[in-house]
Image: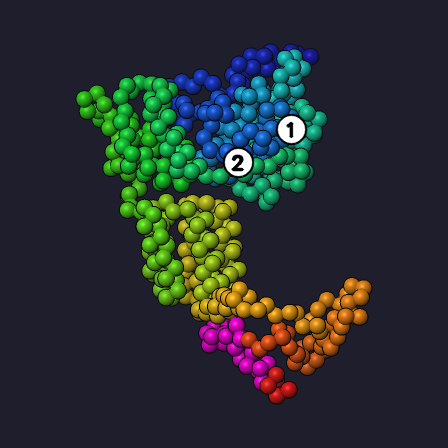
């Protein structure tokens, strides 16, 4: 009984401290000072928060039990969670997947039950880096999510399908947050400068357009990184005539990156040099242009997509493993993010640059498409047509088809196109040289038939 009274008093005393984001003291970091309290103030993620979207509907209707938010750092997962608590007038309890224990979870669930009983107020238990919780820790949440004792929001930078247990996933709405656009981050930076809560102790701040663009571009879609860089730039710059001027040079020092001339021309020219260096089998040049793109803040997903295309267009069947490596690279880059993604990209680039090359399959499909587009389309030969439906055999479909697996070397001489056309001409390089020899053997059988 005494324990219950003690916990009840503790819950009541905590109610105000558990309020979601509101007033923040001036000593808090800039990202905390700018934390939004309404959807109108929230930057980015319009694909989730526009009117009519599932997450927005669930919040507006106040009808959700468990939500999992995943995406790169600085995309607003914690901020959105606090905003949800604000909008739904819920107490907000924050735990960490790194340091919180099962005991911590059970204690907060107990407080949530008491809070609901005595003040009729719901509690959102927010767990940052939920992927760090093991199966037993995640299991603890399930009964109380199921019976409505708590609402749960988990945040992770990892794909939840690999790190969150199936029972918790099946009870959750899962949403992916995307890196913020340069425009979204620029708007956020300007708001920090223009609003009193951004720098309340500094009256005049001027930031050049070049500095805004550099910080927004170099932050790689991470709003926290951008705001921290701006705060360093502003608070470490000596005022001139009672005004702080943040230039491009100051922005470079604050985010500890060198500005590169990397406009639209730089983007396309560097990407072109990157591809041509791999095509030319020069791993050193390919790594150099990769490094330039990474340093300039190029979207790592763009780089990974180009490697996938290259693996098929320029390597093809000369090394069929290249496409597998490239696709795995694209998936890993999406999951890992920078800075570690540079290692994965570096491996893929050096493999592709040093692999045997062939564009035979690329040339072949383009030649076939050209014939389809420009010439009369060939009818499917009757012996190749589907003969499984009623009446097909009466029309001669499938008649005369030779099943290759019943023949020597699993090869049967028959016409598969109606006309004689050569689209795929393997080169004498890598594994494709073996394919070349195999096709020559098959052609000799056809010619001798």
Rendering quarter of residue 379 = bottom right
For the record, the magenta segment spans 422-444
Q: Residue at x 24, y 25 (%)?
A: 244
Position of 366 relative to 149 (above/below): below
In the rendered image, residue 97, in percent from the top left (x then y), is placed at: 54, 34
Quadrant location of the C terminus? bottom right
Position of 407 relative to 366 (above/below): below
Tell me if residue 438 is in the magenta stretch.
Answer: yes
State how many labels appear: 2
In the rendered image, residue 190, in percent from the top left (x then y), is placed at: 35, 28
Question: Can residue 129 be seen in this snapshot?
Answer: no
Rendering quarter of residue 25 = top left
Question: Can residue 193 be seen in this snapshot?
Answer: yes
Residue linked to disc 2: 47
Position of 440 relative to 349 (above/below): below
In screen coordinates, is 228 left or right of 88? Answer: left
Q: Residue at x 47, y 75 (%)?
A: 427
Judging from the image, what secondary structure is the residue with disc 2 in? Answer: helix
- Mark 1 and mark 2: Cα distance apart in space: 21 Å
The residue most toward the bottom is 448
Of 320 and 228, nearer the camera is 320
In the rendered image, residue 152, in percent from the top left (x then y), is placed at: 61, 29
Q: Nearer the viewer, mark 1 or mark 2?
A: 2
In screen coordinates, is 31 left or right of 159? Answer: left
Position of 364 relative to 291 (above/below): below
Q: Which mark is residue 65?
A: 1
In the rendered image, residue 397, in percent from the top left (x then y), is placed at: 74, 70
In screen coordinates, is 295 left or right of 438? Answer: left
Q: Which mark is residue 310?
A: none
Q: Residue at x 33, y 18 (%)?
A: 200
């Amino acid at each position: 009984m005494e324990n219950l009274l003690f916990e009840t008093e503790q819950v009541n005393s905590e109610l105000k401290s558990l309020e979601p984001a509101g007033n923040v003291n001036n000593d808090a970091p800039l990202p905390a000072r700018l934390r939004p309290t309404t959807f109108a103030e929230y930057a980015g993620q319009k694909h989730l928060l526009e009117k009519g979207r599932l997450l927005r509907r669930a919040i507006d209707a106040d009808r959700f039990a468990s939500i999992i938010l995943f995406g790169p750092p600085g995309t607003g997962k914690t901020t959105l969670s606090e905003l949800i608590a604000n909008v739904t007038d819920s107490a907000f309890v924050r735990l960490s997947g790194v340091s919180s224990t099962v005991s911590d979870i059970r204690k907060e669930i107990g407080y949530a039950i008491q809070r609901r009983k005595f003040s009729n107020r719901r509690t959102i238990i927010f767990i940052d880096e939920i992927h760090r919780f093991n199966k037993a820790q995640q299991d603890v949440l399930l009964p109380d999510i199921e019976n409505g004792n708590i609402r749960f929001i988990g945040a992770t930078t990892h794909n939840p399908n690999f790190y969150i247990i199936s029972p918790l996933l099946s009870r959750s709405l899962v949403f992916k947050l995307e890196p913020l656009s340069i425009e979204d981050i620029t708007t956020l930076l300007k708001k920090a400068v223009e609003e009193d809560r951004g720098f309340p102790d500094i009256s005049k701040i001027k930031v050049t357009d070049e500095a805004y663009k550099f910080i927004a571009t170099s932050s790689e879609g991470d709003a926290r990184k951008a705001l921290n860089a701006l705060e360093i730039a502003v608070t470490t710059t000596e005022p001139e005539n009672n005004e702080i001027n943040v230039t491009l040079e100051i922005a470079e020092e604050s985010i500890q990156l060198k500005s590169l001339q990397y406009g639209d021309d730089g983007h396309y020219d560097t990407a072109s040099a990157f591809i041509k260096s791999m095509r030319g089998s020069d791993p050193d040049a390919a790594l150099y242009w990769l490094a330039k793109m990474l340093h300039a803040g190029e979207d790592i997903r763009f780089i990974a997509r180009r490697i996938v295309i290259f693996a098929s267009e320029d390597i093809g069947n000369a090394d069929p493993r290249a496409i597998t490596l490239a696709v795995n690279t694209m998936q890993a880059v999406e999951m890992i993010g920078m800075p570690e993604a540079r290692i994965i990209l570096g491996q893929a680039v050096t493999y592709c640059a040093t692999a045997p090359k062939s564009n035979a399959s690329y040339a072949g499909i383009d030649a076939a498409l050209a014939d389809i587009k420009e010439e009369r389309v060939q009818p499917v030969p009757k012996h190749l047509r589907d003969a499984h439906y009623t009446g097909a055999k009466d029309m001669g479909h499938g008649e005369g088809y030779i099943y290759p697996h019943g023949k020597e070397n699993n090869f049967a001489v028959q016409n598969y196109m109606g006309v004689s056309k050569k689209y795929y001409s393997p080169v004498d390089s890598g594994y494709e040289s073996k394919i070349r020899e195999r096709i020559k053997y098959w052609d000799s059988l056809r010619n001798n038939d």
